[in-house]
Image: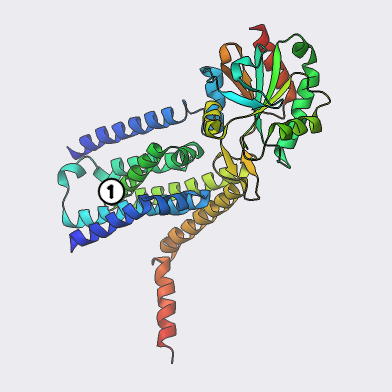
């Protein structure tokens, strides 16, 4: 059962790393930053979840009290790949791209190994930092007067900026929703669906 | 135990992260590829390879035979309706502002087309005639198709389709000084700065 789950994630990773899907996702800045990078991180995260459920990982986790080390590594990796220069290089240089395809899932894996260990207040700080980072990058790409990526057009950069800001705002709403109402935002929609289904 | 180990691991992670970020951005100075190549030209000028061009007069010559102590290189394509048109007028201005240096044989202007499919020597001559009053000191050339990639790599120029049948690229004026070293990459719109950098390079 477990092996099958890991196998599926590995296949997904291979599909993302194989030329057709990879070059399509890298053909636009918005797809590159907002689809490929999150998918790669998500794959790593899912594999990490499977591992944490089946292994205690005690030896490794003794270096990761409060999830601190894992979150730091993940932050550095994700921040770096959001900069214009590494984005360009990933597109122009296959070996840099390979580095990205490996390091981003590792960042997701690090989050999976760490998140359950992070104390609630520190989680809030991490959420805030993610929101601030999305807004900061979005604003930066929107405010730039010139193209920041040489491999992407100005319009692509503008769209990416807008989407980053929207994503940051959506993330902020989702996080505050839970803080304010005590239930995750998807529970609200799920309940709305239930009531509709129950109506005669 | 776990706290001490974590403190150590987290410190190492921070140091490693900062080291990678430092080297990936040239000491937190170049966050884009464009600023990186400009910084590289100023900090560690590298010689450009002696590649050949098909020139506007129909002859073929390597870059070492372009003459002049200083060569001002830009990349264009003659079919360009927008940006290269302004590059053309910048070169016409440079031709006038640097007339004395050109006459003395110190400076040559060189426009290189990155569209070998469409740009023949005749197209290049027409492009020059559209912008400049004379041909004095302004050479144009187009690389052989198989050498285009080498030309672009040598100068760090990235050309992408603009989605409208044309191209977009990181336009700039590249100052090639003595020994064919790429010593500066300047904003094409800032003619004063290009003139100043050229005079500095001649005086070196």
Q: Residue furthest right?
A: B133
Residue A70 or residue B166, whichever sits in front: B166
Residue A33 or residue A131, whichever sits in front: A33
Answer left or right for A148 relative to A31: right
At 27% from the left and 60% from the top, the residue drawn is A8
Residue marked by disc 1:
A114
Q: Chain of mark 1?
A: A
Quarter occupied by the N terminus of chain A: bottom left
Image spot of residue A124 (x, y percent): 39, 51
At 39% from the left and 65% from the top, the residue drawn is A184
Q: Residue furthest bottom?
A: A200
Image spot of residue A173 (x, y percent): 48, 60
Answer left or right for B156 relative to A116: right
Can you say whether A194 is above or below B147 in the image? below
Where disc 1 sits, the SS reads helix
Can you say whether B18 is above or below A142 in the image? above
Image spot of residue A186 (x, y percent): 41, 68
Residue A81 or residue B159, whichever sits in front: B159
Residue B165 or residue B96, whichever sits in front: B165
Image spot of residue A164 (x, y percent): 52, 51
At 66% from the left and 14% from the top, the residue drawn is B70
Neighbor class of circle 1 (other Cα within 10 Å; few <14, some 14-19, many 20+) is many
């Amino acid at each position: 059962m477990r092996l099958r789950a890991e196998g599926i994630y590995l296949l997904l990773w291979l599909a993302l790393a194989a030329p057709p899907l990879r070059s399509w996702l890298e053909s636009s800045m918005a797809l590159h930053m907002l689809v490929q990078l999150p998918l790669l991180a998500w794959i790593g995260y899912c594999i990490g979840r499977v591992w944490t459920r089946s292994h205690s990982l005690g030896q490794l986790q003794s270096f990761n009290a409060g999830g601190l080390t894992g979150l730091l590594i993940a932050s550095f990796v994700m921040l770096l790949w959001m900069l214009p220069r590494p984005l360009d290089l990933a597109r122009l240089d296959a070996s840099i791209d390979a580095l990205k395809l490996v390091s981003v899932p590792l960042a997701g894996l690090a989050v999976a190994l760490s998140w359950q260990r992070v104390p609630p207040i520190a989680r809030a700080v991490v959420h805030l930092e993610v929101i601030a980072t999305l807004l900061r990058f979005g604003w930066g790409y929107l405010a730039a007067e010139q193209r920041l990526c040489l491999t992407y057009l100005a319009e692509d950069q503008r769209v990416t900026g807008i989407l980053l800001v929207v994503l940051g705002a959506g993330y902020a709403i989702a996080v505050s929703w839970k803080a304010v109402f005590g239930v995750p935002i998807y529970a609200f929609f799920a309940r709305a669906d239930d009531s509709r289904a129950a109506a005669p | 135990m776990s706290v001490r180990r974590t403190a150590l691991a987290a410190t190492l992670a921070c140091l490693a992260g900062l080291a990678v970020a430092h080297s990936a951005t040239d000491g937190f100075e170049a966050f884009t590829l464009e600023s990186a190549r400009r910084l590289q030209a100023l900090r560690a000028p590298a010689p450009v390879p002696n590649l050949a061009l098909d020139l506007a007069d129909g002859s073929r010559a390597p870059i070492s035979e372009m003459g002049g102590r200083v060569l001002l290189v830009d990349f264009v394509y003659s079919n360009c309706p927008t940006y290269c048109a302004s590059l053309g007028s910048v070169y016409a201005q440079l031709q006038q502002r640097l007339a004395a240096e050109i006459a003395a044989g110190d400076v040559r202007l060189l426009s290189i087309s990155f569209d070998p499919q469409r740009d023949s020597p005749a197209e290049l001559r027409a492009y020059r005639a559209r912008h400049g009053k004379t041909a004095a000191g302004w050479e144009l050339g187009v690389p052989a198709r198989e050498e285009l990639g080498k030309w672009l790599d040598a100068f760090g120029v990235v050309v992408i389709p603009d989605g409208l049948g044309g191209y977009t690229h990181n336009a700039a004026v590249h100052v090639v000084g003595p020994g064919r070293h790429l010593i500066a990459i300047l904003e094409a719109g800032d003619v004063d700065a290009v003139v100043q950098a050229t005079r500095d390079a001649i005086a070196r």
